[in-house]
Amino acid sequence: MQTSRARLFKEYKAVQREKGADPDIQLVCDDSNIFKWTALIKGPSETPFEGGVFQLVFAIPEQYPLQPPQVRFLTKIFHPNVHFKTGEICLDILKNAWSPAWTLQSVCRAIIALMAHPEPDSPLNCDSGNLLRSGDIRGYQSMARMYTRLAAMPKKG
C-alpha cells in the first residue's frame, strides 16, 4: 500500500505541475482519499462527442500500479464500449493489457482515443454496437450526439 500511495502522490504532483498542459483532461484527486480521483475529459473533435465534457470516476486499488484502476463514466454516453447504465468501460488496458507504466493521465488519453475509435465487436452497449456493426454510422452518430447534448454539454439559459 505504501508503494501505491507513493506512486499516486507522484502522479498528483505531476498533475499539479502540468496543469493546463493537456487541455482535454482535468484530473482531480479527492481531498481526503488519494485512492479516489475524478477526471473531466473533453469529447474528441470530429466525433459525435465533440463539445461535450464527460466526467470519469477512478477507484484505485491498494495494489496500484500493479493492478489497474477501476474507471467508469459518470456522464451518460452512447458508445459501444461503455455500459449505458453503469458507465463501465471495456478497454483492454483496464483489464488484461494493464502495465504499471500507465498513469491516470495516460488512461484518460486512452479513453479519449476509444471515444474516437469505438470497438463494436466487444460491446457493453449492444444497441450502439449493433448500429455500428450493421453499418448504420449515421444512426450511431445521431444517437451519440443526442446523448452528448443531453448529458455532457452545459445547459444554456
Image (cartoon, rainbow, N blue to C red):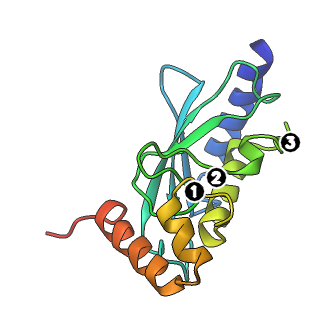
Q: Earlier in the sequence, mark 2 or mark 3?
A: 3
Tag in front: 3 or 1: 3
CB within 8 Å, label 1 to label 2: yes
Q: Tell me if residue 11 comes above or below residue 135 in the rendering.
A: above
State the residue position of label 1: 25
Measured Cα–Cα span from mark 3 to mark 1 = 19 Å
Q: Three-letter amino acid code at disc 2?
A: Cys
Q: Earlier in the sequence, mark 1 or mark 2?
A: 1
Image-based side of 151 in relation to 135, left or right: left
Q: Tell me if residue 126 comes above or below residue 8 in the rendering.
A: below
Q: Residue at x 53, y 83 (%)?
A: 137
Q: Residue at x 50, y 67 (%)?
A: 128
Q: What secondary structure is marked by label 1? A: strand
Q: Residue at x 43, y 61 (%)?
A: 53
Q: Residues within 10 Å of mark 2 (few under 14, many from 20)?
A: many
Q: Residue at x 69, y 51 (%)?
A: 91
Percent position of residue 139, x then y = 44, 81
Q: Residues within 10 Å of mark 3 (few under 14, many from 20)?
A: few
Percent position of residue 125, x then y = 51, 57
Percent position of residue 96, x then y = 81, 41
Measured Cα–Cα span from mark 2 to mark 3 = 14 Å
Q: Three-letter amino acid code at disc 1?
A: Ile
State the residue position of label 3: 101
State the residue position of label 2: 108
Q: Earlier in the sequence, mark 3 or mark 1?
A: 1
